[in-house]
Image (cartoon, rainbow, N blue to C red):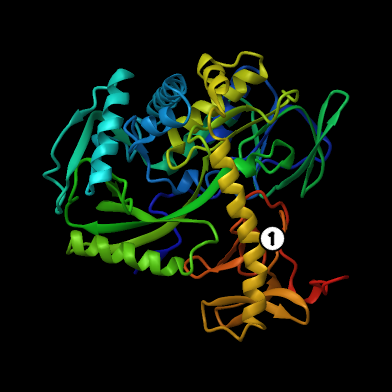
Amino acid sequence: MTTANAPLWAVAPDDRRDAFVPDAHCDVLVVGAGATGLAAAASAAEHHADVIVVDAHHPGALTSGRSTGKITFLQGVRLSTIRDRTSMEVAAAYLDATRIGAERIRALCADGPGYEVAPAYSYATTEPGVDALAAERQVANDLGLPVVDTSTPELPFDVSAALRLDDQFMIDPGVLVGRLVSSARQHGARIISGCTATAVHASDDGYDIETGLGPIRAGAVIVATGTPFLNRGMHFARLEASRSFVAAFRGETAPLRGMYLSVADDTKSLRPAHAHGADHLIVSGGHHLVGRSDSPAQRVAALHEWASAQFPGLRLTHTWAAQDYESTDAAPYVGPIHLGENGILVATGFAKWGLAASVAAGIALAESVRDDAPSWVKQMQAGKGRGDAGRLVARNAEVVAQLVSGAAHATMEGSPDEPAEGQGAVGFEHGRLTGVCRIDGETHRVSAVCTHLGGTLRWNDAEHSWDCPLHGSRFRFDGARIEGPAREGLRTHSDVPHRGE
């Protein structure tokens, strides 16, 4: 049986729920219990800060726990892309961050299950891809990485060019999350699951944080969610939210030894994994911008068909998806939410390579609270924003176009029909923009307006969610918030106001 929407990795819900204490005071409040937040909490607590972590779900429930677990400095064409959009100095800073994060992860996971050293490959099957690989090899070599041209005899299809970097490694993300949780708690941090932060206000001695469970007071705040939920940083306007699908296939033996990533085409990521007592092949692909795919389910089916055709005889066991955010200049942002407010720190924009860089970012944010930001952060901040004005304008023009076209499309569609099982649609009912879906025989009606900035939601037929095409907020079929900059869930049909009310 295939396990849908569940990673191969065992990221268990937090079995030790620290009690929430309203009006509690701490030195550092961390919002988000993914790799960034947990690394920040562990580092800050290790240096004797009183730390509280809050998360709307449980540690590692979203992107960190749904990663493919590849830790490598050869990340497709990431270094050359950052160099082209910013500078060689920013690319060097990003590589430094990746090294720091990788070493921390190695120290945490090298003696645990799922850790395996392997070569990393980037490969191309198109002429643009060949050119992109040549640029990446040059930048990597200039930065001291021993990346070499290579062949790919393991792959069962033709490849035009490939790069290889030896002595990289793979992990089980569930192990990483568990050990970061243990490290944070070992040093006294409290981790509170099921607690959504909704607002942050400056006070005389720090910040007052509103949460769904009650207020918390903190001297400093680290926002370690996928995209910062505080609009005053305007990071959502510089980020592009995307989702990719991942599938695990089981076989008698692993068909690959190395980890692979294609470039400049329909991107596929491949790696072996030994889990649950068996060898697996993990395949990732189906990349699409959140809320802008007509049928994510078709992308899932295409990914499964491709993997089955290339690696016949394997049995599909798990399929899931993860969300990533990429900045306009391709480099992460790590530092103050904006100039002049150094007490609120954020980290975002890791694209699809968040594990190593995000762990480094968490450590760096904890150091920044102590006014000791590492040199790579300062170097990256100094070079951020160069030449990305055109991309920023284009990206937000597309957001405006999605805002306008969403309601227009719903108007043309009219009132949504009763959908079939697993399907959903958006239209106007009694003057209200409404999303209607049918799950497990029950029909659900919710507001189809995103609670962040009012985007018209679209139905995700692969994950049975309502997705916003503006900035990547997502909601369950019944309207409960899942992730993204939105802080509130959707209104149900009974309390959706008519237009003009």
Q: Position of residue 57 (x, y in %)?
A: 61, 50
Return the residue found at the far left.
Answer: 153
| Image quadrant assignment for residue 348 | top right
Looking at the image, residue 69 sits to the left or right of residue 465; the answer is left
- The residue lying at 61 percent from left, 64 percent from top is 476
Would you name the residue on which mark 1 appears? 450
Is residue 84 toward the left or the right of residue 59 in the image? Answer: left
- Which amino acid lies under the numbered mark 1 shown in the image of this protein? Cys
Figure check: 307 above or below 128: below
Is residue 226 among what the camera can see?
A: no
Q: Is residue 410 left or right of residue 149?
A: right
Q: Is residue 199 above or below residue 423?
A: above
Whether residue 142 sits left or right of residue 203 in the image: it is: left
Q: Quadrant of the N terminus?
A: bottom left
Which corner quadrant holds the C terminus? bottom right
**Residue 345, horizontal then vertical, whole percent:** 66, 29
At 17% from the left edge and 47% from the top edge, which residue is drawn? 159
Out of 209 and 176, give the one closest to the viewer.
209
Residue at 23% x, 48% y is: 126
**Residue 35 in sight from this viewpoint:** yes
Q: Residues within 10 Å of mark 1 (few under 14, many from 20)?
A: many
Q: Position of residue 90 (x, y in %)?
A: 47, 23
Circle 1 SS class: loop
The quarter of the displayed image where residue 364 is located? top right
- How many marks do you count on the picture? 1
Q: Which residue of the protein is positioned furthest toward the bottom in this rendering?
A: 418
At 23% from the left edge and 45% from the top edge, which residue is drawn? 127
Query: Where on the picture, by quarter, is residue 5?
Result: bottom left
Residue 246: x and y, percent? 38, 55
